[in-house]
Image: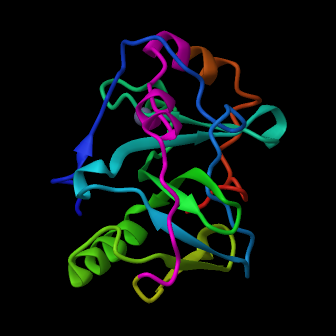
Amino acid sequence: MSEENSRIFFHGTQPIVDKPVGSGADFFRLQPGESAVVSFLLKDERDIISIYEHFWPGPGGEGGRSYTCIRDNCPLCIAGNNPRYVSFAPIYNHDKKQVEIMRMGIKFWKNQVELFKEYGSFTDRAYKIKRTGSGFDTTYTPMPKDPGSVEVPEIPEDQMPDIMKLIVAKSKEELSGIVGGASSGSMPGEDSESPY
Ligand SMILES: [Zn+2]
C-alpha cells in the first residue's frame, strides 16, 4: 500500500458525525508493552481506508480529538497543524472478543500488506500485535500466528464498524470554529493514547 494507490476519501462539505474519542466505535488500543491477538477483517487491500487526519488538542492542551483533513484550504492546515496519513481497517480482537477499528500509520500498514502478500491472504491467520514504546517512539510489531491456530467467529455484516461514517469530515466553517476556539494558539501535542 502507498499513499498513491490506497483509497483516500474526502467529505469536506458533508455534515458531520463526530469522530472518536468515545463515539461508540471500539478502537484497537494497546499500552506500551502490551500485546493482543487480532484477525484482520479485510477482503482485499482496498478495504483499508486512508485519510489525512489532524490531532487538535483541547483547551489548555488537555484531551483533544482527531479531525479529518479536508485538504483544500483546510483551516487546521492553515493554522500550522500538520495532518498525518493514517489508515483504518476492521479487526477482530481475540483478547477482548470484539470487533474493533484499527487506526495505524502508513509504516504499520505497508509492513502488514507485505505480510498479507507473503501469505497470499488477508485472513488466513491471526497476528499477535505487540506495542513497544510511547509517543513518537511507538512501534507495533506483528507476529503471525500459525494458520488455523486461532478461530475467528462469524461476524454478521451489521456488526461491522462503519468506518466511513466515523471519518466524515467537518465542514470548513466548523473547522474554522475549532481553530478559533483553540486556547492561546498552543501548538498541538502528541495524544499519548493515539495508536500510531
Ligand atoms: Zn488539514
Q: Which of the 4 quarters of the picture holds residue 64?
A: top right
Nearer-the-camera pick, 181 or 137: 137
**Compared to 177, does 64 lie above or below?**
below
Nearer-the-camera pick, 111 or 181: 111
Nearer-the-camera pick, 125 or 33: 125
- Is residue 164 in the magenta section? yes
Chain part drawn in magenta: 148-175
Q: Which of the 4 quarters of the picture holds residue 71?
A: top left
Q: At 62% from the left edge and 67% from the top edge, which residue is drawn? A: 94
- Whole-percent x, y for residue 28 in the image: 62, 57
Prevailing secondary structure of the magenta residues: loop
**Compared to 44, does 51 lie above or below?**
above
- Whole-percent x, y for residue 2 in the image: 22, 61
Compared across the picture, whether 181 is left or right of 138 comes to right
- Is residue 190 in the magenta section? no
**Compared to 28, does 75 lie above or below?**
above
